Image: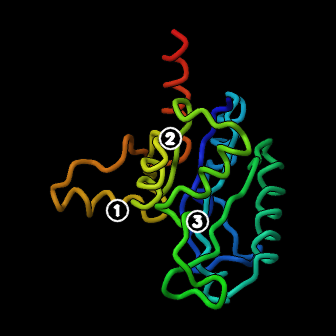
Amino acid sequence: MEKAVFLDRDGTINKEVTYLYRPEDLIILPGVPQAIKRLKDHGFRIIVVTNQAGIARGYYTVEQMHKLHQYLNDRLKKDGAWIDRFYYCPHHPQHGIGEYKKMCRCRKPGTGMFEAARQEYGIDKNRSYMIGDKRIDVQAGHNFGICSILVGTGYGMEEREKSRSLGEEPFYDFYSETLMGAAEFIIGKEYKRHE
C-alpha cells in the first residue's frame, strides 16, 4: 500500500489560465516545486487529478494536454520534483462534444480518477490526502474517503471567504495559504503517526 498526495492542477500547481494547454502559458506557482519535493522526500506518490473540460468542448486535444503535462514535469524536475501520474477527465455533461458529452464517474467531485490511482498504486487511504483550490476538489477527496485540504491559491481564498460569509462550517479538513503550508501539515501528521 502506498501513501499519496492527490493534487488539483490549475490554481493549485500552476496559475489559473482559462483552458490552459499551451506550454508558453504555464506559470508554476511560487514554492510549488519545493513543496512537491518535500512530499516526495517523505515517500508520497504525487498524483494529479484534473477536470479538463477544454477537451470536452473541443478547445484542445488530449495530445496537447499530454504535451503540457510533459512540459510541466520537465520544469518540476529541474527542482528535483515531479508528478508520478496525471489522471484527467475529458468529459462534460452539458458542454461536451461527441463522445465527450456525458455524465461520468471521473469528473470531480466524482472519484473515478482516484479509483484508477488506487488500482494502479494500491493507495492507502488512511495515509493519503487531496489538495485543491476549489470546493469540488475537497468534495472529491471526501467522496474518496481521504483528508482534504483547501489552498488559498487559485480560487481557494475566494471559496473560503464565500463559505465563511454564509456562516458554513468549514468544508475542508485544513486550510493553507500555500501548497508548502499544506505539505508541512501533511508531513507533520506523518511524524505524529510515528511517535
Secondary structure under the numbered disc 1 in the rendered image: helix
Q: Badge 3, how many Cα within 10 Å: few under 14, some, many 20+?
A: many
Q: Position of residue 166 (x, y in %)?
A: 17, 61
Label 3, label 1: how far apart the Cα atoms are: 15 Å
Image point (28%, 60%), residue name: 161
Q: Residue furthest top?
A: 195
Q: Residues within 10 Å of mark 2 (few under 14, many from 20)?
A: many
Q: Amino acid at mark 2?
A: Ala
Residue 4: % across, % down = 63, 38
Find disc 3 in the rendering and name its residue: 10
Label 2, secondary structure: give it: helix
- Mark 2 lies on residue: 182
Percent x, y of residue 36? 67, 43
Q: Is residue 194 above or below residue 51?
A: above
Q: Residues within 10 Å of mark 1 (few under 14, many from 20)?
A: some
* Distance from the alpha carbon under mark 2 to that under mark 1: 17 Å
- Amino acid at the residue labelled 1: Glu
- Vertical placement of 78 versus 71: above or below? above
Report helix, strand or loop for mark 3.
loop
On the image, numbered disc 1 is attached to which residue?
159
Distance between the Cα atoms at labels 3 and 2? 16 Å
Q: Are marks 3 and 2 in contact (CB under 8 Å)?
A: no
Q: Is residue 125 left or right of residue 90?
A: left
Quarter-of-image position of residue 149: top left
Residue displayed at 43% across by 65% down: 155
Residue at image coords 53%, 40%:
129
